Amino acid sequence: MDISKVREDYEAVIGLEVHAQMLTKSKAYSNDINEYGSRPNTNISAISLGHPGTLPRMNKKTIEYAIKLGLALNCEIAEYQHFARKNYFYPDLPKGYQITQDKTPICTNGHIDLKMKDGVKHIGITRIHMEEDSGKSIHDVDVYDSLVDLNRAGTPLLEIVTEPDMCSGDEAYAYLTEIRQLVRYLEICDGNMEEGSLRCDANVSVRKKGASEFGTKVEVKNMNSIRNVQRAINFEIDRQIEMVEKGEEIAQETRSFDAVNMRTISMRTKEAANDYRYFPEPDLQPLHVSKEQVNAVKTDMPVLPNALYEKYTKELNLSDYDASNLIASKPMALYFEELIKHTSNYKGAANWMSGEVRSYLNQQGKTIEEFPIQPERLAALIAIIDEGLVSNSVASQKIFPVMLEDNNKAPKAIAEEGNLIQDTDEDSIVSVIEEVIKQHPGEVERYKGGEKQLVGFFMGQVMKASGGKADPKAANKLIRQKLEE
Ligand code: ADP
Ligand code: MG
C-alpha cells in the first residue's frame, strides 16, 4: 500500500521514556561497584542478589543527581517522597521486584525547548524518578542456554518521561540529542546508547488530523542509537497509518526495533494494563528533600549547553552553526571558554576550533583533553595574525604544526625563528612586485588588455617571491596600483 498520498491526513503523537544509568561509584541501594564491562557476576553481593534478610540502603549521590537533572529540565522537586516496589518475575531480577518511585517521583512538571528548523518546540517533562536497573539476560552467547549477568542489577537509573508532545522522528531525534548532551554536561550519565547506559522507549500513536482523541499507542524498545529511535518511529508511524487506512485495529503492544531490517516486530501485547502490584517499599525510609538541599545543588550546577549557546550567539555574536558546534561536546566548550579568556577575536577563535583544532583531533583520534596546545598559546597565535605579523595560512601551515610538536614555544618566537614574520613594509613589497612585473611582460600586456583576473596570477608570484611573507592585503592593493601605472 502506498501511503504517501494519505500521510498528510494524519498526525503522529509521540512520548518518550528515557532510562539513564547514573555514573555513581556504587549501586543504588548497596555498595557494590557500579561499573560497565566487568567480568560477569563479579560486582554483586547478598544485597544486589536479593538474599532474604538483606536491607537496601539509599545511595545519597543518586538524589543529588536526580535534583541536578530536574533543575536542568525546569522541574519541580518534590519535598516528600517514598520508594515503591514494582513486582514482576524475570530471571534477571533476583529480588522479584524493582525498587522505584511510583506515586511520588522526585521531579515533575518540567520542560525542554528544542531548536527545530521551523522554530522552537516545547516538550513537557511529565516526571523523573529514581529506580534501579535489572540484571541482564544474554541469549546469544551460549548455544543451548540463556545466561544471566547480575552486575547491572541495582545500578541507579533516572527515568525521564515526556508528555506526548512530539510528532515526528526528527523531534524525537532532537530531544534525545539534547538529553544526552545535558546528562553529559551534568556528568551524571555517560550517555552511551550503544552500551545501554542511555536507553529510550518510544510510545507512538497516530490519529487523523483534527481528531480530539489520541490513537492507541504502541511502545517500541531496543534502539541502540538516537538515529535508530528516529528510524523506528518513522517506520512505526507509517505502519500504523497503513493499518488505519486498511480499517484494521491497532493493538496496544510492545514492539522491538529490528535494526537489520529497519522495522519493528511485536514482542508482547498489553491486553490489560500490567499489574505490578506497587506498594510502598518498607525497607527504605521515606525521603525528605529540603529546600536547602535543592539550593545547594543549584549553586553547584555546572555550566549548561543552553546557557553557553545564548552567550555565544548573543554576547559573542557567533552564528547558530558556530555556537552549536562549540557546545556539542562539553570538553570542547570548556576549551573554548578558556580560549576566549585570552582573545576577543571570538569568530577567529571559533574558526580555529572547528578548523585546525578539530581536524588535528580527528586525524590523531584524540580528544580535546589530549590536545597539546594550551588555550593561552592558541590565543597568542590568533593575536599575531590579528596584529598582521603573520597571515592565516602561514599560521596554520607553518606555525601551528610546530606548536603541536613543542607546546613550550610561543607562536611569535616560532615565527621569528622561522623567518615567517609578514612583510608589511610597502617599499619592500613594491620592490618584489616590480621584479615580478619585469619577469612577466606578456601577462602585464594581457592585464592591460582587459584580463583583470590575472591579478590572481601576480598575487601568486609575489607571495612566492616573498617566501609567503608579503602581507596579502597590502600586496593585493599594490599590485593593482602598479599594474594600472
Ligand atoms: P504506561 O503506563 O503504559 O507507561 P503512560 O501514560 O505512563 O503509559 O505513558 C508513557 C509514555 O507514553 C509517556 O511518555 C506518554 O507521553 C506517552 N503516551 C501516552 N499516551 C500516548 C499516546 N496515545 N500516543 C503516544 N504516546 C503516548
Ligand atoms: Mg511505560
Image (cartoon, rainbow, N blue to C red):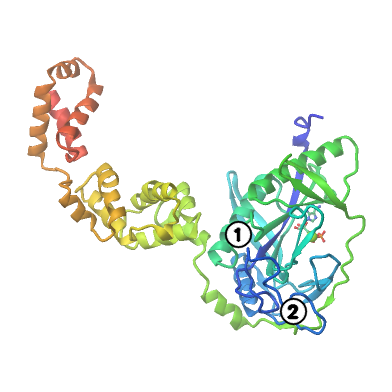
378 relative position to 175: left or right: left
Residue 277 is situated, as x and y percent measured from the top left of the image, at 88, 71
Mark 1: secondary structure: loop
Camera-side residue of 319 and 219: 219
Residue for badge 1: 191
> Is the N terminus in the top left, top right, bottom left or bottom right quadrant?
top right
- Give the answer, above or below, for where 163 lies relative to 463: below
Residue 102 is situated, as x and y percent measured from the top left of the image, at 79, 71
The residues tagged by marks 1 and 2 sit, at their Cα atoms, a distance apart of: 27 Å
24 relative position to 322: left or right: right
> Is any part of residue 462 visible from this angle?
yes
Q: Amino acid at mark 1?
A: Gly
Residue for badge 2: 47
Ligand 2 shown in quarter:
bottom right
Ligand 1 closer than 8 Å to label 1 CB: no
Q: Residue at x 79, y 73 (%)?
A: 103
Residue 154 is situated, as x and y percent measured from the top left of the image, at 72, 72
> Is any part of residue 121 visible from this angle?
no
Q: Which quarter of the picture shows residue 46?
A: bottom right
